[in-house]
Image (cartoon, helix red, strand yellow):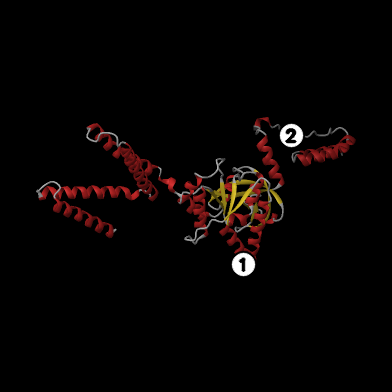
């Protein structure tokens, strides 16, 4: 910053000193000094306003201004037959000399992005439908879900596999670590699977950026040059690309968006896979990888049980579901309560009172005794009545 300030001060001093020596306003030193200082101040302000302008727009303005000046000089030379002594002809020459450079500066500054190499190359391409490029990252190739997305048709456009990504994938496949080696070979198999699909257009790009060393930054530069999107599941690459203004398709975000919505109070069937961290907890996983933590399910490991959802927790790593184990009777009762309307107590009728055997006949009392005993088991008040009837018969 100090060098810029020093350069501005030296420029201002040079302009003021030139105005003092050359005296453009006549033999008046103070007026010449103020005039030089004002011109230098205008130039510094103009330079300060241009500091946020991109290089392509400034180059476009310079090129446009030069082209405009050349056109003005050519038109002025074509009017050689006009009388230069006429004031109207002189004004016309001056107007042309000012108009075309002005138009060149303004239009060149506004359309400066057309000086980029990709835009210049697009001018010479054949007219046709614009390709939508999807640039694959190393992590999303190893992940493997991109093949299923291409097979279902949700990923359209042209899949671009950069040469530096293939090189990194080959280095992973040749690693001494068995886990990394298997991951790299899996990525190569996924690429072969994608290439064999009929509906997918896959190209291998030889574009490289030697001045950039990191693979992630090379992907960003390639996406900017092709005006494409990066397909990845790397969280850090996703953030850096968004900061650079490059669109990203994150597979993990797509998977989280497609997870089923579960509300507290719903009943779901899960397979208890292992024991939880807390006491008497079991852990299960859904088909999409969502973890389900179930209370009172430690004894139900390796079994499929009914679980009532108590709460759902959404984190940056994904979604977690908490539930409680229901035994079969509780599960059926919960389902019936969800389907039926609860009845009031006034509609419940008490059980009928047991009938006592007549005391006039011994045989009848004896015959009724088993039934009386069964009634007594249902009602404790019938036991003394049965005993009194038996003694009266004897």
Element type where label 1 sits in the image: loop
Q: List the single residue furthest toward the right.
A: 363
Instruction: Residue 100 in the image: state x and y as whole percent.
Output: 33, 39
Pointer 2 residue: 351
Pointer 1 residue: 175
Q: State which quadrant residue 2 falls in.
A: bottom left
Q: Is residue 295 visible?
A: no
Binning the other alpha carbons within 10 Å of mark 1 as few (below 14), some (14 to 19) or many (20 upward) gives some
Instruction: Residue 23 in the image: state x and y as whole percent.
Output: 13, 50
* Mark-to-mark CA distance, 1 and 2: 80 Å
Q: Residue at x 23, y 55 (%)?
A: 11
Residue nearest the viewer, comparing 393 with 15: 15
Nearest to N terminus: mark 1 or mark 2: 1
Quadrant holding the N terminus = bottom left
Binning the other alpha carbons within 10 Å of mark 2 as few (below 14), some (14 to 19) or many (20 upward) gives few
Residue nearest the viewer, comparing 114 with 150: 114
Element type where label 2 sits in the image: loop
Q: Which mark is residue 286?
A: none
Q: Residue at x 35, y 49 (%)?
A: 52
Instruction: Residue 272 in the image: state x and y as whole percent.
Output: 68, 54
Q: Residue at x 27, y 37 (%)?
A: 93
Q: State which quadrant residue 281 falls in.
A: bottom right
Residue nearest the viewer, comparing 148 with 53: 53
Q: Is residue 55 left or right of residue 230?
A: left
């Amino acid at each position: 910053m100090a060098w810029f300030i020093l350069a501005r001060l030296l420029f201002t001093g040079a302009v003021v000193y030139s105005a003092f020596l050359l005296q453009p306003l006549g033999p008046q030193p103070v007026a010449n000094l103020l005039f030089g200082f004002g011109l230098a101040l205008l130039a510094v302000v103009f330079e300060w306003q241009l500091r946020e302008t991109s290089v392509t727009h400034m180059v476009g303005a310079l090129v446009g201004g030069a082209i405009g000046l050349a056109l003005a000089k050519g038109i002025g030379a074509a009017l050689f037959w006009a009388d230069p002594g006429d004031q109207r002809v002189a004004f016309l020459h001056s107007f042309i000399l000012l108009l075309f450079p002005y138009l060149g500066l303004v239009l060149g500054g506004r359309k400066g992005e057309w000086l980029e190499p990709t835009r210049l190359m697009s001018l010479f391409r054949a007219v046709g439908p614009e390709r939508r490029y999807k640039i694959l990252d190393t992590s999303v190739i190893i992940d493997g879900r991109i093949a299923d997305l291409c097979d279902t048709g949700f990923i359209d456009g042209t899949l671009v596999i950069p040469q530096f990504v293939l090189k990194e994938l080959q280095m992973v496949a040749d690693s001494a670590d068995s886990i990394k080696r298997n991951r790299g070979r899996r990525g190569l198999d996924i690429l072969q699977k994608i290439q064999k699909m009929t509906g997918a257009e896959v190209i291998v790009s030889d574009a490289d950026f030697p001045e950039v060393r990191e693979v992630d930054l090379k992907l960003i530069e390639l996406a900017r040059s092709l005006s494409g999107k990066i397909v990845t599941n790397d969280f850090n690459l996703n953030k850096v690309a968004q900061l650079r203004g490059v669109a990203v398709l994150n597979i993990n975000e797509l998977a989280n968006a497609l997870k089923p919505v579960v509300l507290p109070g719903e009943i779901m069937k899960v397979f208890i896979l292992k024991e939880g961290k807390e006491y008497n907890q079991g852990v299960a996983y859904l088909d999409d990888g969502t973890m389900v933590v179930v209370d009172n399910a430690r004894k139900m490991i390796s079994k499929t049980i009914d679980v009532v959802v108590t709460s759902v927790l959404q984190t940056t790593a994904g979604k977690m579901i908490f539930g409680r184990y229901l035994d079969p009777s509780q599960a059926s009762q919960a389902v019936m309560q969800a389907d039926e309307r609860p009845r009031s107590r006034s509609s419940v009728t008490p059980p009928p009172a047991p009938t006592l055997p007549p005391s006039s006949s011994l045989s009848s009392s004896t015959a009724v005794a088993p039934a009386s005993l069964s009634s007594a088991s249902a009602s404790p008040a019938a036991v003394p009545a049965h005993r009194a009837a038996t003694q009266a018969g004897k």
